[in-house]
Amino acid sequence: MDIALDGAAVRFGEFQAVHPTDLTIRASEFFSILGPSGCGKTTILRLLSGFLDPSEGEVRIGGQPMAGIGPSDRPTALIFQNLALFPLMSVWENVAFGLEMRGWKKAQRRDKAHELLRMVALDGQADKLPGELSGGQRQRVAIARALAVEPAVLLLDEPLSALDLKLRQHMRAELKQLQKATGITFVYITHDQGEALTMSDRVAVMNRGWIVQVGSADDVYHRPETAFVATFVGETNRLPGRIETASDGKARIATPEGAFVAENPAGLSSGAEAILFLRPERLHLLAGRETPANTLTGKLVRRDMEGAFSTLVVETGAGQLTVQRVNAGTDPLPDGPLHLGFSDSAGVILPPGDTADD
Amino acid sequence: MTSLRRSFGAPLSAVIVLLTGIWVLGLIAAPQVIMIEQSFWRMDRPAGAAELSVRIDALYNRLDVLALDRAAAEKVKTPSSLNAELARLDAERAGIEAEIARLEAEESTPVKTWTLANYAQMGQAHLWIFAKTILASLAVTAIAFVVCYPIAYAIAKLEPPRRAALIMLALVIPYAINELLRVFAWQMILNYGGPLNAALGLVGIGPVPFLESGTGVFVAMVYAYILFMVFPLYNVLETLDTNQIEAARDLGAKTWQIHRRIVLPHARPGIAVGCIMTFMLSAGSYAVPYIMTRGTADPWFTQLVYNRFFQATNWNVGAAYAFSLLLVCTGFVFLMMKLLKVRLRDIAK
Ligand SMILES: Nc1ncnc2c1ncn2[C@@H]1O[C@H](COP(=O)(O)OP(=O)(O)OP(=O)(O)O)[C@@H](O)[C@H]1O
Ligand SMILES: [Mg+2]
């Protein structure tokens, strides 16, 4: 089922937790909402699940206006940030809770619960209490419990944040697969950009109650529209300066490190204050006769070995840049000054604004 | 023990153990043991004790008669015969006094006999009062629970925390007033000529004998002990994760289903503590029924116990009565724990 926010906003007294938002989530889409802590992600989810009413605007699910329809009557199921399993009920009773509330007979409930538990690979644990399970297992119980009521929309509030890295990666894959298999619309909330980028069909990036950009993972990573998105999603170098010339969607920006040509999606004109954002992996060491659009020189300060690639910290005289370099094993780092370069489509020039670290 | 010594050192742990021992023995064990011991014996006078006292009384009468005889003789008799008569009377008196002393010595050593008779003393009338006290206390407990559960739930889960604290404070303040004053206030309110009956009179009802019918005892007790129900309930409900309530609602639970499946099971330890406290306090209450009924309704069992001790001055029967009450209360504690599947450990928390 598709979801539409039509100028929906949430205010808690004087505090505007979610500013008026227009947003469409398509049916059977894996949609992520990505944003820092406190930006209003949970609030949006509570708006969709019916625990909150919009203070203005409208929420529609499957084309149906949701005003006056409570959480139990919406085609949504919510997986809570802390899972909120019922600690005094066994695992299968947890999973069957929604069915119990719908008046199913005990034998049928039990069968259905076991079926769901098999699906999440937990059929041996049906009679344990949630407290006796590991974090990942509890996670899967919560998923099975939500799926039991056959929702058209599954709302997930940072469900993996309590898990360790390995398990998190494993569960990401499982969730993605589950979403494909069931065709349920997933609205997935996270503050972990890796999670959002790998799993989602589309990502909405949120900041301070605003949805600042909606797009595919590639869009938000390679084509950020604001300084906030550029800094919040992925690592990036920042080179503040002033536009010299602008034409054809590109611009030339003068920075203390030199003047560079890069994308100009915001259509900034000459004289404007701006920042050049440049991903570490788009900056590379120049070898031989290459003549990229932009070049600069610096001194190696540090090299962090990270396995598949290394991160180089380069001092340019005006500041430090990070460069990511694939470890192909053959090419040793040159002695003396490093010559760096990047193409005119590698960087993005955006007006100054909120960034992820202030 | 070793861990105690490791953390506090030998002298300090000795002191701790000693103090704990004194606490357990002196404040918990000793009073109970004394009470139980008392309840299993009585002082029996030996067989024929009644006859003995009749004889002693008769001898005292005889002494009085002798004294009269002597006075009469002193007036009438000639000196010669007087002396002989007086000597005879004195001899007789000495004999009687010796006899009295002997009999009295025999009488004043009643024998301590071990017996269950103190318990059997509880006749049908007292047994009925006992049963009624227990039933009434159960009813007070039930009413207190029904009244307090919604209050505690509303404060713990529906109010923002800061206001919840204020409401709890407001609930506590009236209890800073002496219990007797509060109960007397209720007595005045519910009295035949009290404001409540006056109000009822305005709408053409009454006057209702609240106090005489025993209703007053209920009202005052529910009022007096309601805090002991509200606090444990509030404490336990406060620890309930609100997300669980919302999760249940999201999965389609109606309000009553949420309470039955989520809130009440979570609140079990608090319910147990609240019910046990309210029941114990009601069953053991002396002042509230005493003030509220003014002797116009059936007495509360504690009043019987009191009477055994201080009016019949039969401490053994009093102890037996008190111990019966204690047994039932203890039974109630275990029953509640069994019913609510609560262990002692949960309650201690
Ligand atoms: N019931 C409420 N009353 C007042 N303010 C609230 C309420 N619920 C949330 N807020 C505020 O709204 C803002 C957004 O909260 P929200 O829970 O949506 O954040 P979030 O993005 O989910 O953060 P996190 O990643 O930490 O979970 C926060 O500043 C929070 O303090
Ligand atoms: Mg949140």
Image (spheres, coloured by chain):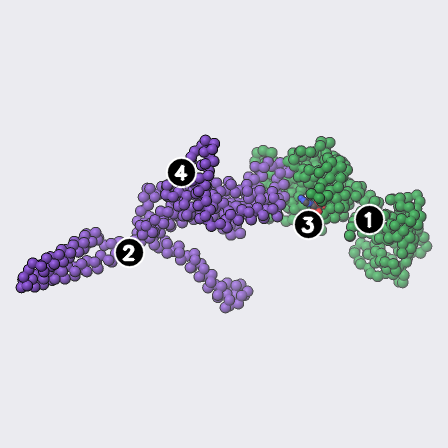
As drawn, the label of residue A163 is 3
Residues marked 1 and 4, same chain: no
User: Is residue B232 left or right of A354 when viewed as pictured?
Assistant: left
Q: Earlier in the sequence, mark 3 or mark 1?
A: 3
Within 10 Å of disc 4 (Cα), the crowding (few <14, some 14-19, many 20+) is few
Residue at the image position 38 percent from the left and 56 percent from the top: B33
Chain A colour is green
Q: Nearer the viewer, mark 3 or mark 2?
A: 2
Within 10 Å of disc 2 (Cα), the crowding (few <14, some 14-19, many 20+) is few
Up-down relation of residue B243 to residue A316 (above or below): above
Q: Report the Cα–Cα distance between label 2 and label 4.
A: 43 Å
Q: Secondary structure at mark 1?
A: loop
Does label 4 point to a residue whose CB lies under 8 Å from ligand 1?
Answer: no
Q: Quadrant of residue A107?
A: top right
Residues marked 2 and 4, same chain: yes
Q: Nearer the viewer, mark 3 or mark 1?
A: 1
Q: Report the Cα–Cα distance between label 4 and label 3.
A: 64 Å
User: Disc 2 sits on a residue from what chain?
Assistant: B
**Residue at the disc numbered 1:** A353
Q: Report the Cα–Cα distance between label 1 and label 2.
A: 96 Å
As drawn, the label of residue B213 is 4
Letter of the chain in purple: B
Amino acid tagged 1? Gly
**Residue at the disc numbered 2:** B112
The answer to whether the residue labelled 2 contacts the one labelled 4, judged by CB atoms less than 8 Å apart, is no
Amino acid tagged 4? Ser
Q: Secondary structure at mark 3?
A: loop
Up-down relation of residue B54 to residue A142 (above or below): below
User: Disc 1 sits on a residue from what chain?
Assistant: A
